């Protein structure tokens, strides 16, 4: 049920995108204490983006999950920023993350909701 979407102006080839998806999936599953069987990750690279009026490397991430607590978001932000900096060279000051706690009735899967 967790969904993490990364949008960045950094260029990645398909192999790099796949490796980053796997790494982010593992990180989110571990940090949220959820099975990786339910984690979905999307990487949109080479997007036209600006942050603070420049096109220097930047990233925007969305993390949506059922039961996402504000108690976790500080830790999640720290680890996600570290991961993006290590793998894309985007500094934490050039990253925005949107956290969304989704109601079970508003998250569909397998022809039903959670």
Image (cartoon, rainbow, N blue to C red):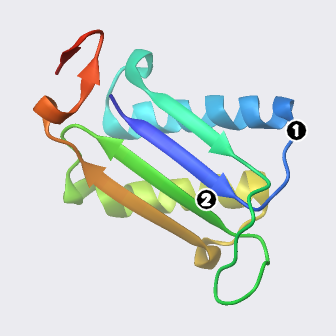
In the picture, measured across the screen, residue 55 lies left or right of residue 103, that is right
Q: Position of residue 108 (x, y in %)?
A: 25, 23
Q: Nearer the viewer, residue 11 or 21?
A: 11
In the picture, measured across the screen, residue 36 lies left or right of residue 58, that is left
Figure quadrant of residue 17: top right
Crowding around mark 1 (Cα neighbors within 10 Å: few <14, some 14 to 19, many 20+) is few
Q: Nearer the viewer, residue 73 or 103?
A: 103
Q: Position of residue 67 (x, y in %)?
A: 18, 40
Q: Is residue 41 above or below residue 49?
A: above
Q: Nearer the viewer, residue 89 or 110?
A: 110
Q: Secondary structure at mark 1?
A: loop
The alpha-carbon separation of the residues under discs 2 and 1 comes to 21 Å
Figure quadrant of residue 30: top left
User: Which of pointers 2 and 1 indicates the residue nearer the eye?
Assistant: 1
Q: Quadrant of the N terminus?
A: top left
Crowding around mark 2 (Cα neighbors within 10 Å: few <14, some 14 to 19, many 20+) is some
Q: How many marks?
A: 2
Q: Secondary structure at mark 2?
A: helix
In the picture, measured across the screen, residue 42 lies left or right of residue 63, that is right
Q: Quadrant of the C terminus?
A: top left
Mark seen at residue 82: 2
Figure quadrant of residue 88: bottom right
Residue at image point 83% right, 32% down: 14
Can you name the residue that lies furthest to the top here? Answer: 110
Chain-order first, disc 2 or disc 1 = 1
Residue at image point 30% right, 9% down: 110
| Contact (Cβ within 8 Å) of mark 2 with mark 1 | no
Q: Is residue 45 above or below residue 73?
A: above
Residue at image point 75% right, 86% down: 54
Q: Which residue is mark 1?
A: 13
Q: Position of residue 82 (x, y in %)?
A: 61, 59
């Amino acid at each position: 049920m967790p969904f993490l979407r990364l949008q960045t102006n950094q260029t990645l080839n398909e192999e790099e995108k796949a490796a980053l998806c796997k790494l982010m999936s593992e990180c989110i599953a571990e940090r949220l204490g959820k099975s990786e069987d339910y984690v979905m990750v999307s990487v949109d690279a080479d997007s036209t983006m600006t942050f603070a009026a420049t096109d220097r490397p930047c990233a925007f991430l969305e993390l949506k999950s059922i039961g996402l607590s504000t108690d976790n978001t500080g830790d999640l932000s720290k680890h996600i920023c570290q991961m993006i900096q290590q793998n894309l060279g985007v500094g934490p000051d050039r990253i925005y993350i949107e956290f969304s706690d989704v109601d079970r009735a508003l998250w569909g899967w397998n022809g039903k909701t959670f």
